[in-house]
Image (spheres, rainbow, N blue to C red):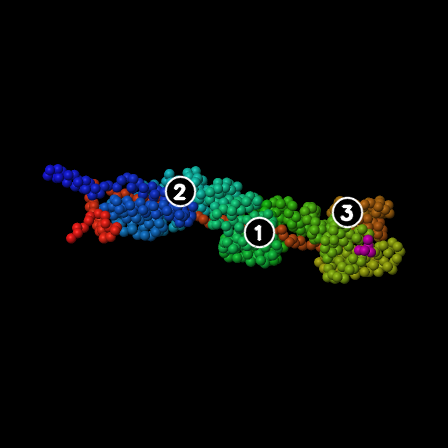
Amino acid sequence: MIRKVIRSFLIIMSVMFLVCVKQPASAQDFSACQRLLKDLLVIFNRSFEENNPALLKTPEYQYELRELQTEFLKYDKQSFMPSDSVQRLNNEAVVLALSGSYQKALHILESLDMSGQEAQLQYNRGLFNLLSRKFQASRDDFSNVSNHSYSVVNSIVAYGKEKKFSDGLSFAQGNQQKNSEGKWSYNVGLMYKYTGLLPEATDEFSSAIRQKDEIMAYRLQRGDILMRTGNQKKAVKDFEKVARKHAKAQIRYANALLSLNQFANAKAVFEKYLESDDKTFRGDAYLGIAHTFYGLNQIREAQQYYRLASTLKRETPALLSGIGNTHLSNHDYQSAYNSFDRAIKKDTSYLPAYLGRAVAHYGMKQFELTLADFKKAESIMDPENKFYADLFVTRGFTEYYLKKSKEAQEDFTTAIRLDGARYEALAGMSSIMIDQKRYSEAGQFLSKALNYEQNYDRMWSNYGNLLLHFDMFKKGYNVFKKAISLNSENIKAQNGWGVTLLENDQLDKSMVLFDSLVKENPELPYLYNNRGIVQAYLGNRHEQRRQIEDANVRYENSFQDFKTAMEVAPARKFYNVNQGNVYKYWQKYDEASLSYQTYQDKSALNNTAVMYAGQQKMKDAKYYLGVAIQIDSLHRVFQYNMNVLVKGKQKEMMKLVASAGDDGPFADIGIKYSRDGFVTIYLYDYEYDTLAFKGRHYMPLPVAEYKEDYFIPEYDFKFLPYPKHKDMVRVKRGKYKSQKVKMPGRKGRSGTQCPVF
């Protein structure tokens, strides 16, 4: 019996001993911590890959973080022994880092002596240094564990964040790292981008994409460079691929479509984003829609969306430039200047704002300032982009007004090449050709311009003056009539109209018109000159009618008009030719000869020959007329006068030419009122208008450049497991059980009965 009791006692004690001894942690306990850590690191690293710290605040991440903390406490409670303090500190630091307490995590590991410790421990400390922006210390840690898979990548990141790009590139060239999911290539590419080596940067970003296309930043960075280098179509493909998953890529994609002038498609993408739940880039989306309306020339709607965008985001240069563009479209140059000037003050390197301010200066006739701003933005004046045509026109006229005809001609030529219907440039070229006395080319340019714009009186007036130059009076008659119908106050058009009335043998109407013009504008010499010609022809008509006194009055008035014209404009020597004609009528041949010699051109030579022919000095007449023909062998007046002179058939030739149509270089009025059968040439005076256009201002859309350049590290923290212990015993504490006390009463009657004394 005693033996049975002893045997039972030993069995019970053995069981109690087994229960009290601490068992090693199962693999499943630690693997739960590892699994949760692995899941958390995916989100943790994605927050850096997408530059989106908000991911670490999501309920999903916070829930998994609490689970990890719970599992770790459970594992620690079950498995920790005093000799495991280093591992415990490492693991606690990792949890702190995942919670965002980077400094606390670093402080824990800085308190440890790393000599003789595992390499992972120092690697983790390097990651904590990187998170805490202690870049040199992080590189030192990574250099001591260079065999770790991401030591090189994270060292490059440390160089990049410290803006030591040259040092970082040198380090990278000697430490290439494969199997980094593209992060080595991406970070090296970003350094190339910062140093201005865009082709090399593009190559590295392309390599990163080939390694792992799922990371959004790779295509965004390559797309940004493609946009900057003018490869918008390729950039659209990059942005489009990532736009399906990422909101910020949608905005870039839409802006790339804007750069290709696909306004409707861009607008649809912006609106699609606004329909989503994401609120991060709503201001950018409204700004983009404003750009699309501007591109579609719906200025009022564009202004509404620019105002809406300004309530959701700060005043960026792109926003201010967009607002300025709408002011330019409305020709509100002062408001436009204010917007562009604010944009430049915010970012002096933002070139589109200089272009806008240049146009604003032009609108305010501040031409020197216009050229100065164009000079600053010269690098983005794209001579292959048709939407820059108006800018080249604006700069061209600015240069023309500042007497820089060569530069103006180049800009007008570029504008015409970009847009053949750009009538402002065609008209500008005609003005330059007129200044260069290339009248035939001027007429061609102006004729083309009038095909596209028929409501500008000055263009018609200039075209009419070109027709006067070629003695095409019948055609000029309708041209000046059109000019006056557009603007009856255009004096130059009225002057041309008076000349064509004269050549159309409406002498009285022409005289009334010039009397009125001279009265209202007594300072204009060409009005006196042309009225003098009308008076001379009226004198010829009176003389033909044998109204000698009236003829002499007209000749005297004509002489006085020419004299007044020369007094007002002494530099215009050709007035002397007209005055010489009056001397000839008065038979004051010496004075006439002197007047012709004062302005010795082909017309003066012709009139000199006619004067000698009237005096029957045929030899002298043939000499002067021969010289005139040598100068211009195709001049039909010279040919006519030579035929009359040689054949002596003045009356027959006079009738022949007078009956012919006005398709030649002179009108029949020269024959009709001829006193001797010869054509005496009068030199009309006219001035070309300086053309100025209101401007069809269409500015390039403000460049949406995103300065979201960030390096991407790889945070691959690891827990350190506790070593297994076989001989450690845990004392099991007995659990105290409270005794039940039965109280008297009906409820307490059951159970042991107390004896009754």
Judging by the rendered image, the residue that carries numbered circle 3 is 665
**Residue 364 x %, y %:** 61, 58
Mark number, residue 190: none
Judging by the rendered image, the residue that carries numbered circle 2 is 183
**Residue 266 x %, y %:** 54, 45
Query: In the image, what residue type sits under mark 2?
Result: Lys
Q: Earlier in the sequence, mark 2 or mark 3?
A: 2
Front residue (pair 236, 448): 236
Give the SS element for disc 1: helix
Mark number, residue 302: 1
Magenta span: chief secondary structure: helix
* The N terminus, quarter of image: top left
Q: Nearer the viewer, mark 2 or mark 3?
A: 2
State the residue at coordinates (52%, 45%): 272
Give the SS element for disc 3: loop
What is the spatial separation of the Cα atoms under label 1 and label 2, in whole angstroms? 41 Å
Q: Is residue 589 visible?
A: no
Q: Earlier in the sequence, mark 3 or mark 1?
A: 1
**Span colored in magenta:** 506-510
Circles 1, 2 touching at the beta carbon (< 8 Å) = no
Indicate yes or no whether the magenta region holds residue 509: yes
Front residue (pair 9, 540): 9
Neighbor class of circle 2 (other Cα within 10 Å; few <14, some 14-19, many 20+) is many
Q: Nearer the viewer, mark 3 or mark 1?
A: 1
